[in-house]
Image (spheres, grey):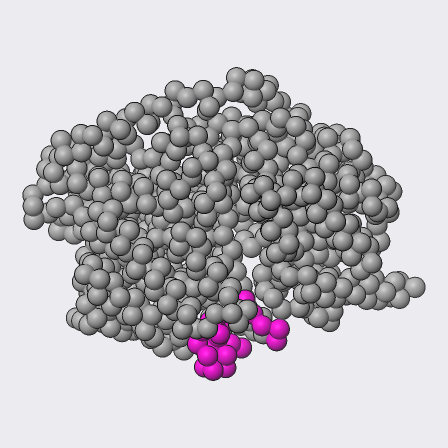
Amino acid sequence: MTEQSAAAAARATVYGYPRQGRNRELKKAVEGYWKGRVDAAALRETAAGLRRTNWRQLADAGVHEVPSGDFSYYDHVLDTSVMVGAVPERHRAAVDADETQGYFAMARGTQDVAPLEMTKWFDTNYHYLVPELGPDTVFAADSTKQVAELTEALALGLTARPVLLGPVTYLLLAKPAPGVAADFEPLTLLDRLLPVYAEILADLRAAGADWVQLDEPALVQDRTPAELTAVARTYRELGGAADRPKLLVASYFGRLGDALPVLAKAPVDGLAMDFTESGAANLESLAAVGGLPGKRLVAGVVDGRNIWINDFEKSLATLGTLLGLAGQVDVSASCSLLHVPLDATAEGDIDPEIVRWLAFARQKSAEIATLARALTEGTAAITAELAANRAALASRAGSALTRDPAVRARAAAVTDADGRRSQPYAVRTAAQRAHLRLPLLPTTTIGSFPQTTELRTARADLRKGRIDTAGYEERIREEIREVVTFQEKTGIDVLVHGEPERNDMVQYFAEQLTGYVATRHGWVQSYGTRYVRPPVLVGDISRPEPMTVRWTSYAQSLTDRPVKGMLTGPVTMLAWSFVRDDQPLGDTARQVALALRDEVDDLEAAGTSVIQVDEPALRETLPLRAADHAGYLAWATESFRLTTAGVRPETQIHTHMCYAEFGDIVQAIDDLDADVISLEAARSHMQVAGELASHGYPREAGPGVYDIHSPRVPSAEEATALLRKGLEAIPAERLWVNPDCGLKTRGWPETRASLENLVTAARAIRTGLADAGS
């Protein structure tokens, strides 16, 4: 490695950092605020303390330039809406009365006012609040948060770079506000928005910002010529402003494609690009446009989305090539470290051999600093680090923990016939109706019921030895009895056991499958105060013994109504885990599918007539470029069918999806060949029902009528109105009635009231249909 001159010393930096704190202090403070136990001042102090800790950790790791403004109480896209004054009219009074309470009202809603719609952030499991815009939207700059957080970082003696969501991506993520024509294009508001961004940039410059990062991840998707023209206009205007900081335009999650030459020509001072496997084409594309002479290039060579250690030699080879393509090359992760846990050294329960292979946010920060030092001083400066890195990589490549010959042989023997039901849907649905004898518009829930404090305490008591297994299992039986009794009394038609024994819909299964490793402290934000611990997929997957049959059978013994068996599907098991990167995803999905197929078969053999295999991540994992869709969807849909195809015709297979743009994958939903699908629809006002109808979807569907990510209780009238809207697209004989998603995060009082209203609505519609037909 050739040394850079001292004047061009490589800097280490990151785009963003985990927000929650080592012990999820942010979650506890925010939820305490919601419950009135924490006041606004204490909430702000907790947040400020977490920011200080994060910045100091980064500086101690050797990061030269820390991000500011990436911290959020709930979501950075919502923060952007506040920054540019795009507050929906229905929330305006709440925001004007109390900024903090109004902010959370936009995120979560109130009993009287619905929240903003929520959906997935590109192809991740992070959820953002969708901006609502219309032709009457008036933007206004509010740089208070961004300036305050920059000032905090500078006061610590750090070099800080404010991070803003870029204006083009912000508008491309937005949707027409309620009441606005569906064909309204938020990007038409660009000329109104740019002066607001220019004002905010000037405020940051005045507050001491040398550089400001503008995130434009939407540019790694397929973009139209008109959208690329908007990009050029945006950065010509912002780059041409007289009173501005230096501008770093950041992309991540893949290759820039046609947007790269547009940005390379723009009057901005630097680009940040992904040079990991997902953005591998960026290196060739950058060379093709002649590089970035005289400009800064922040090279994302450390994977910001997965948890495996970096291959230093491979990254240094990439960085060496990039040295000739830009005036200044700095080192970073491929995206914000928001998407990985905080610290691998906290995982004392994991095999030390495996821990050697892992890098969470703190370890990735150190990797970035090491690579920057090598880029500046030469590889001789990191001799010890290179040797340790080679040894750890070799340990993983040669470990018996990663390979199981029996699993590989079984996966290799799979045939096309293994992924096909024995009868077509028309035959199956007749058999299922005769067997299940459900009413018109059958009611059900998605699976989980509230995870109460008592349940979480019982799980912790078992883990710490304060109760024995027998005591814990009796607590689970009590909860299942309560859940089943409530559902019967309420009048729900297809019941669930409530999943009281499950800590998480992926982790629960991962802990019972070979090849997975569960973390204890590996929390990652999913949305708001919802944090998950994605398990780590280390080796080949198999199912040693049944995982769900016992509790499902127990619930079924309590009732004559059908109880659904509940499983998490193979794509979601991968998407919400940290997957292995040493074999194709499709190969891993097939292994998981075969393990789940064994569970499906055992559930059916135990008398379970309805089995739900959830795939909420099917749309989330869709590649960002259309050219890559077909290959992904082929193995994704095959893995679902391989999981479910072995059952008899009268066994009804359900699936569930939530919080995504389903219109992009309606054909794939059809290809799953599930008998019933339930989908999120309440926040998106039954949009998916129309999308299914436009496609000609031939099977049964339950678009949700209860938004479970808000504490508000929808009235029976509200649910009835949504059902009537659903009936405009889906015939009554194929329409199910259900919430948007599982009820794990809700409390019992709101759950009881909401489900009672849901059943009341279904009965009202049934009565109306019967009267109309008589």
97 magenta-colored: yes
Rendering quarter of residue 730: bottom right
Identity of the residue drawn at 67% across and 48% down? 500
Rendering quarter of residue 659: bottom right
Q: Quadrant of the N terminus?
A: top left
Identity of the residue drawn at 23% across and 32% down? 385
The percent coordinates of residue 738 (x first, y second) are 71, 56
Identity of the residue drawn at 48% across and 42% down? 520
Q: Is residue 216 above or below residue 419?
A: below
The percent coordinates of residue 633 (x first, y second) are 54, 38
| Residue stretch in magenta | 90-112
| Frontmost residue, 260 versus 491 | 491
Q: Quadrant of the C terminus?
A: bottom right
The percent coordinates of residue 469 (x first, y second) are 66, 38
Q: Is residue 589 above or below residue 76?
A: above
The percent coordinates of residue 220 (x first, y second) are 37, 49
Residue 248 shown left or right of residue 641 in the figure: left
Taking the view exactly as shown, the residue that stands out farthest to the front is: 466
